Structures are given as C-alpha cells and as structure tokens.
Amino acid sequence: MQRVFVLDTHKKPLNPCRPKRARILLRAGKAAVYRRFPFTIILKRVVEPDPHPLRLKLDPGSKKTGIAMVNDQSGEVVFAAELEHRGQKIKSDLDARRALRRSRRNRKTRYRKPRFLNRTRKSGWLSPSVQSRVENILTWVKRLARFAPVTAISQELVKFNMQQMQNPEIAGVEYQQGTLAGYEVREYLLEKWGHACAYCGKKDVPLEIEHLMPKSRGGSNRVSNLTLACRPCNEQKGRQTAEEFGYPQLRRQATMPLKDAAVVNTTRWALFECLKASGLPMEVGSGGLTKFNRTERDLAKGHWQDAACVGKSTPTVLKTEGVKPLAVKATGHGSRQMCRVNKFGFPRSAAKTRQKVIHGFKTGDIARLIQPTGKYTGTHEGRVSVRERGDFDIQTVFQGKKVKITSSWKHFVNLHKGDGYDYVAAA
C-alpha cells in the first residue's frame, strides 16, 4: 500500500506511515498537511526518530520515468510514481521560436554584416529538450530525499545498440549469437509498438517479431522492417506484405526515427554523474537484469514496476499489493514571453511586465474555491489563473463537465503551490 510521508517538527524525514495512521494523526490535531503531492504530513510534537533505510530506484525513459521507493529489508514498495517528461514540447516551442525569428530577419531589407561566431558550449552540454529530462529526475530525487529516509539510489543504466537496431547482422553471426543477441531489438520493438500486436491490437499474449516485407520476398532485418504480431496474425499474414494484408499505415509507423533510444543513450551518463554527486551510494543495473527481476517476481509490465526491479539489490519478494502510482507530468513554470504574437511573428500587444504573485496566488497553484452564491455554489478544487484586478479563474469539474469558474480571490484557499508539475492522485 502506498505510504504517507512524515516529517518531524524540524522537517526531518521519519518512517512513512499508512494512510489510516495519517488520518488519525490529522483528526487528533497531532499533525498537519505539509504537502499535497506527494502527500506529506508534519508532526506538531517532537518524537525520537528511528528511520528505516529506503532505496530510491529509477527506470529512466525517453517519455516517462518510473520511480519506486523500496524497503530492502521487508521488500515493500513504499512509494511509486510515473514521471512524464516534456522534451518534445520544449523542442516544438524552440522550433516555433526559431522559425519566427528567422522569418523576421529575412524580411529586413537592410544588410547586416555577419557577426563573429564566439559562442562556445561547455563540455557535456545537452540540448534543452534533453536536459529537461535530466533536471526533472534530479528534482524528484531531491524532493523525495527530503520527505523520506533515502539512503541509496539504484538506476537502470541501459544502452541501446543503434547499429544493431538498424542492421542486426552488422557484426556477423558471432555478434548475434551472444547471450544478449536480439534482446535490445526486441525490447525496443515492445516499447515502440506498445506491447501489443500491430495487427489485432491484443495485449498480454505471446508476441513474435514479424517482418513487414517478408524475408522470402527480399525483406531485411532492419528495425524499420520489423514489428510485433501474435501467432495467429503472423500465421494468417504468411508471405504477404503489410500493405497486402490490409495494414498500409504500419509502414509509416515502422519508419519512425530512433530518437527515443538516442535520448536514453545521450542522457544516461549525465544523469548518473548528477546522481553520484548527491553523495548517496549508487547502484546501476542493465535492462536485461530489470526484465529478469520483473519476470521472476511475476510483476506486470509498467514503468514503476520496472523501477522497483532495477539492480541486484532487488528483494526476492516485492510487496506491491495496493500500490497505486502517482502520475506526474512536467508542465514547466510558464513562459517568459512578454506578449503573444500573430501568425507572422509580430507582437499583438505592447510588451509589459506583470506581477506573478497576486494576493498570495499565482497561475498554476492548486486551490480550493468556496463559492458562496450563484450557479456554482459550493466547494471546488482545481488549477487557478490569477488576474491583477483580483478576479481569479479556476478549472474544475462540475456535474461531470469541465468548467471555468470566476470568483474573487477572497473565496480561494491555496492548497498546493504551483511547482511546474501536474498531478493525478491515485484513486
């Protein structure tokens, strides 16, 4: 069962407690809510700390990262979360900004002499879209270390062989007949095709690697010609191509670039060095070991389950009953853009500085609205958008529909300060 983090009066982490125990402490007035996500309480009295050491385990991915906190002695998964990154959003925003700037410069008729190229990048530089992935993980490692007695970190340090993905026969037969022959290609295909048959969409069934263009008709072993299929679909397709079998759209999906694998390869050592700088003991494990641990413990495929199985320190028995991961999505802290632009890239209004914090609130905070009158009379919770004049908007659900309610700031109570992440609490 997912535990509740506990802090003492000096904000030192104690042993996480069960939700029932947290409710008893809150009702008795012996504790107060310190943070909503992840849910943390702080005690109002001094206690003698006796924390049990916990291990924070990470399964970094290109789009999502699995996080699990495990008690190595008891095998209990104390906390689990799945962190969704925003690297693609950052890249699209930078592409849009570059296009607008280039368009504006090209419309100038005055010649401008080229400037000397004196910009340099420090060693280990990563692009903003990739660096954000590392920063997201580091943020949550530091955050969880403040709320729980974390004494060690485990990270999956997987490496994708890009050349083998493009051409499995590049190093000859001996290279393919090793103990890991075909493993990386298969794992990449499982992730790419969502662990489901590409033809009928069935999941939780044995899947076979299948050629879109059959080898008997000149098809290659390149990853762009490979997909996954269940045995019935594979046998029914036979020597037909994917187009002849009635699935022409698979060709486009199969030729997607290997950017997800490239992101993992690019950031794995950068993340390791940053985690090592924290001073906590580090353990690394391969993707093959993670899959072996998860299979041996009969756990379902998932980001947080993979994280719980990272490394040789994984307990023989993992207690995952009742664990419901916290879904975390990186959203950023807003935009530095001072005014919006039109489709031609020119400002639609005058640039002006604005006050971010108004009456103790800022856009993105999670707040409670106690609406005294009107159509939406009652209590509502959601994300708030602030205005300088004092009328705030809140996005919430009313009678099963998403609505936006406008009310005075005096009717709002701040529950969780905006921290650049969106949350979906476990039900």
Image (cartoon, rainbow, N blue to C red):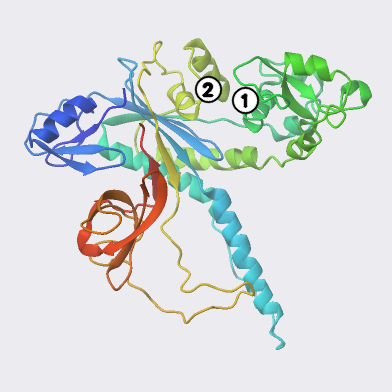
Helix, strand or loop for disc 2: loop
Q: Is residue 259 left or right of residue 163?
A: left
Q: Quadrant of the N terminus?
A: top left
Q: Is residue 272 left or right of residue 164?
A: left
Q: Where in the figure is residue 215, as x and y percent of width and height?
A: 88, 23
Residue 154 % position (x, y): 42, 28
Q: Nearer the viewer, residue 23 or 146?
A: 23
Q: Amino acid at mark 1?
A: His
* Mark 1–mark 2 CB contact (< 8 Å): yes
Which residue is denoted by mark 2 in the rendering? 301
Give the residue displayed 13% in from the left and 29% down from the top.
Answer: 24
State the image coordinates of residue 132 (x, y, percent, origin top left). Answer: 49, 50
Q: Position of residue 385 (x, y in %)?
A: 35, 61
**Residue 374 in which image quadrant:** bottom left
Left or right, residue 224 beside residue 378: right
Q: Quadrant of the C terminus?
A: top left
Residue at the outermost right position: 217
Q: Say the numbered circle drawn on residue 195.
A: 1
- Dot 1 surroundings within 10 Å: few (below 14), some, or many (20 or more)? many
